[in-house]
Amino acid sequence: MLRGFLIAIAATLAAVPGVMVTGAGSPAAAQTPFRPVAVVNDSAITGYDLAQRAQLMVALGYPTENVDALRAQALDQLVQDRLKLEAGRDIGILPSDEAYAEGLAAFAQQAGMTPEAFIARMADSGVTESALRDLIQAEMVWRSVIRARFGSRVDVAEGEIDAEIELLGQGTTSSFRLQEIGLPFTDGGRNEAQTRALANRLYSELSAGGDFEAAARRYSRSPSASNGGDVGWVSRRQMPDELFTALQGLGVGDLTPPLPVPGGVTILKIVEMRTEASGGLDPSDPELRDQIRNRIAAQRSARLAEGFLQELRRDALIEVR
């Protein structure tokens, strides 16, 4: 959710491409920017909304080689935003100035800027504050929705933390520097079967020496896409068991086959790896316990949020014009 956008901003603000994206995908739409290009239940998305979201994505470093694909991604994001806001309204959670200010401050801090400087940087790239506000408010509402709907299911028991520390304290701890390509099932008009076919094709091509970074920039919808798929160093204690299992037996330069994740699949590449002794972990260390608690809670929250969003999409009336 919000954390993913923060990672993307921190990685990409240093070099904002000078590409202006206008219109909603056709000359007629470009002439009538406030004409709806899609309706999600009762909420319209206009050509202007679409052009601004596409421009915001450009400012955050999304690839621009294929403008039609960029617009398709922008429209998909806007559809999700409408569903998130509607889910909030259904339980009395509405956008607020306070939440927007909190989200904006977090964005700006990750980019090493003040909120005012961050807004100005976006404006220089052709993005209005209104478009930025729409993105941030949808994410802040969604975060509150997930907390309200699944709070008790995300809570981590102290016994779970103890068990994880005991496991980590045995033998060695591995860390991996990874690249990723994240492929949502519903991206760009694809269905699940088409997405799996694309993932298998990419796995074959990249395993044979293809350019992983270029493929990540073109196909991935993970926040790391703008950085060539680079997610940095990830330690054993930060990853779910199924991911760690998938990495076992692989070496530097190797790829995992397409792995299932909530709402899609992902392909991972090991860029570097290191192993360190992990003995001597202190079970009473509050920082260690908080790190483990946050990791487990974040994994659960992400799975629940993605599943709920897919339910909302399935039940929604979405009309693209």
Image: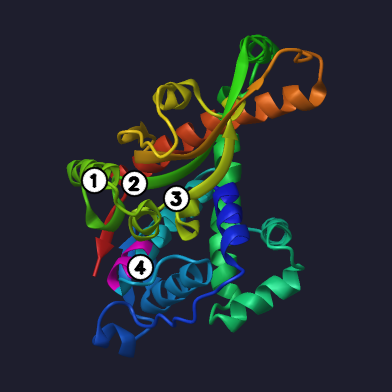
Residue 302 in percent (x, y) is at: 50, 36
Alpha carbons under labels 2 and 4: distance apart: 15 Å
Do the residues bearing badges 2 and 4 touch, measured as CB atoms within 8 Å? Answer: no
User: Is 24 left or right of 82, judged from the image as shown?
Assistant: left
Q: Residue flagged by tag 4: what amino acid is it?
A: Leu
Do the residues bearing badges 2 and 1 touch, measured as CB atoms within 8 Å? Answer: yes
Q: Residue flagged by tag 2: what amino acid is it?
A: Pro
Which residue position holds label 2?
184
Alpha carbons under labels 3 and 1: distance apart: 15 Å
Q: Residue flagged by tag 1: what amino acid is it?
A: Thr
Number of residues whose C-alpha sits closer than 10 Å to that of mark 3, classed few (under 14), some (14–19) or many (20 or more): many
Number of residues whose C-alpha sits closer than 10 Å to that of mark 4, classed few (under 14), some (14–19) or many (20 or more): many
Determine the residue positioned at 77% across, 68% down.
114
34 versus 76 height, above or below? below
Q: Earlier in the sequence, mark 2 or mark 1?
A: 2
Image quadrant containing the C terminus:
bottom left
Element on which disc 4 rests: helix
Which residue position holds label 4?
70
Q: Earlier in the sequence, mark 3 or mark 4?
A: 4
Which residue position holds label 3?
222
185 versus 156 height, above or below? below
Alpha carbons under labels 4 and 1: distance apart: 17 Å
Q: Which residues are magenta?
A: 68-73
Alpha carbons under labels 3 and 4: distance apart: 14 Å
Q: Residue flagged by tag 3: what amino acid is it?
A: Ser
Q: Is residue 41 magenta?
A: no
